[in-house]
Image (tube, grey):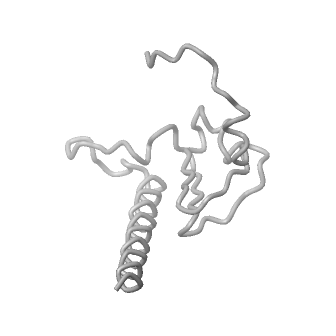
Amino acid sequence: MFNITKRPNLDAINKHGGLNISYPRLAFINGERDPWRAVTPHRIGMPPRESTLSEPFILIKGAVHHWETEGLLPSESKPGLPPCEVVAAQESIVAFVKGWMNQWEDEKALTRLLVQ
């Protein structure tokens, strides 16, 4: 489907920390039942991390792949949909992205002051 013809270079990926990767403004958001969870830092058996503004780490109870990103049409929304855990994750995403944008604006303003 994606015309990928060779295996990924895992050494190139893992040099950044593998499942322990940590970097400012890098978010990990997974559903508890996401089939890709095993290849993420949310893998069962990995130590939990604190979720911070800089490095969000959110595991959505009962959710599957992309529940937090896939919206519902107004006609699909009903009591219990989307699940409250998904709504909470979406609210967290909006909050940390706004925080990142505010930091970027502050950094941009500081750069302008320093250049003057």
Position of residue 41 in the picture relative to residue 90 (left or right): right
**Quadrant in which residue 51 is drawn:** bottom right
Q: Is residue 99 left or right of residue 23?
A: left
Q: Residue at x 73, y 57 (%)?
A: 48
Q: Is residue 51 above or below residue 58?
A: below
> Quadrant of residue 115 in the image?
bottom left
Q: Residue furthest left?
A: 75
Residue at 29% over, 48% down:
78
Which quadrant holds the N terminus?
top left
Q: Residue furthest front?
A: 116
Q: Is 78 above or below relative to 114?
A: above
Numbered circles on residues, count: 0
Q: Which residue appears at 55% of the width and 56% of the height? A: 26
Work out whether 44 lies above or below 110.
above
Camera-side residue: 57 or 6? 6
Q: Position of residue 66 (x, y in %)?
A: 45, 40
Q: Position of residue 54 (x, y in %)?
A: 55, 67
Q: Nearer the viewer, residue 2 or 68?
A: 2
Tell me where residue 89 appears, x and y as whole percent: 47, 57
- In this rendering, would 106 be left or right of 20? left
Tell me what residue is drawn at x 73 percent, y 50 percent: 20
Image quarter in which the C terminus is found: bottom left
Query: Considering depth in this image, is 36 or 2 the residue closer to the camera?
Result: 2
Residue 36, image x, y percentages: 60, 34
